[in-house]
Image (tube, grey):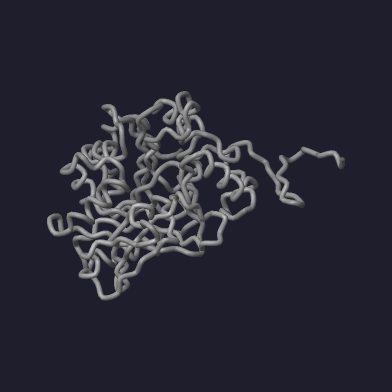
Amino acid sequence: AGRPRAPLSSPAMVKQPDSDLAQQSVLQAVVLADSFAQAFRPVSYQVPKALMPLVNVPMIEYTLEFLAASGVQEIFVFCCAHAEQVISYVRDSQLELRLASVRLHVLAAKSPCFSAGDALREVEALGVITSDFVLCHADVVSNLELGSVIAAHKARRESDRDAVMTTVLRRVPAGSRSHRAEDATLVATSGETGRLLLYEQAGKSVSDHKLLLPTELLQETDRLQLHSDLRDPHIDVCAPELLALLQDNFDWQDLRRDLLPGILGQFEYLGKTIYTHVITDAYATRVHDPRSFDGVSRDILRRWAYPHVPDSNGLPGAAYKCGRGGVYKEVGVSLARS
């Protein structure tokens, strides 16, 4: 007999960790099922983005499998729009049973949420986060092993108690087909520690082929490093204090446009720090618009996101095989030669 399961949609049932989980430090994750964007309208009026099929698999499946493979033990999926559809899918697809080692909770918003900041303020009010946690959206596709990222974050917290976040950045060479000018971000870090000093869209800092930087950056470190080849999959390892900062700053709505500049720009006042973890040999990205939907679909079919491939057959009833020429067929399907 399996362990008893609480109703997936009941926040009251998850306010306190299970007694067996409370005896140890449990690695938790918060997954935001809403993107708080309009890129997939009008489809997203009827179907939540988290359940849109990406190579015949709902997007949220890739995200949860990535977290489970990285050793996350407890996941809170926070839903605003179409929460009932997400709850029904998790229940009917036996998703928690398939993830095996993961305790899965689906939390529905009690009040309207218009941004990631609003959603995380509700999560903080529930009191379910008890230690450092992974934060990402339900449209992340990655084969990154988070163990090294989490270990580095905890090591930094030992030496810098004011560190509230480690954000994962993926290096994308300029000649790569994944390098899109509209996604370019200018990132400044301290070469000694990897501490994040500046994060903004590259277009805001480049004018008439001149790079405009705050003079304060030159006072922060002797080894200032500037990067324009880093892409942000929106995978963060956060301290619980980050949620408290969001409660104190209600104008922080978007996690990248508001929260990061807010913490970095108010360092003298808040005293909080953010660090980066740059990856080069793992796949990590978000499906944030139709163009990236097409690109990530092709990446999966080309097996760049392995083990996230069709023939992994993670969904019940799936029976794909990969044949010659990268053709995926279900068992029993035959194709004519002509």
Task: Specify whether residue 84 is in view.
Answer: yes
Number of labelled discs?
Answer: 0
Task: Specify whether residue 97 is in view.
Answer: no
- Most extreme residue toward the right is 338
Residue at 32 percent of width and 63 percent of height: 188
| Left or right of 319, for residue 38 | left
Quadrant of the rendering where the C terminus is positioned: top right
Image height check: is 304 above or below 292? below
- Most extreme residue toward the top is 46
Image height check: is 118 above or below 234? above
Front one among 295 and 181? 181
- Residue 122 in the image, given as x and y percentages of width and height: 25, 36
Q: Residue 189 is drawn in which quadrant? A: bottom left
Q: Residue 220 is drawn in which quadrant? A: bottom left
| Left or right of 309, for residue 224 | left
| Left or right of 81, for residue 113 | left
- Most extreme residue toward the bottom is 222
Front one among 241 and 279? 279
Front one among 109 and 87? 109
Q: Residue 310 is drawn in which quadrant? A: top right
- Residue 320 in the image, given as x and y percentages of width and height: 68, 43
Residue at 47 percent of width and 52 percent of height: 181
- Most extreme residue toward the left is 269
- Residue 168 in the image, given as x and y percentages of width and height: 39, 58
Residue at 71 percent of width and 40 percent of height: 330
Residue at 30 percent of width and 42 percent of height: 254
Front one among 268 and 109? 268
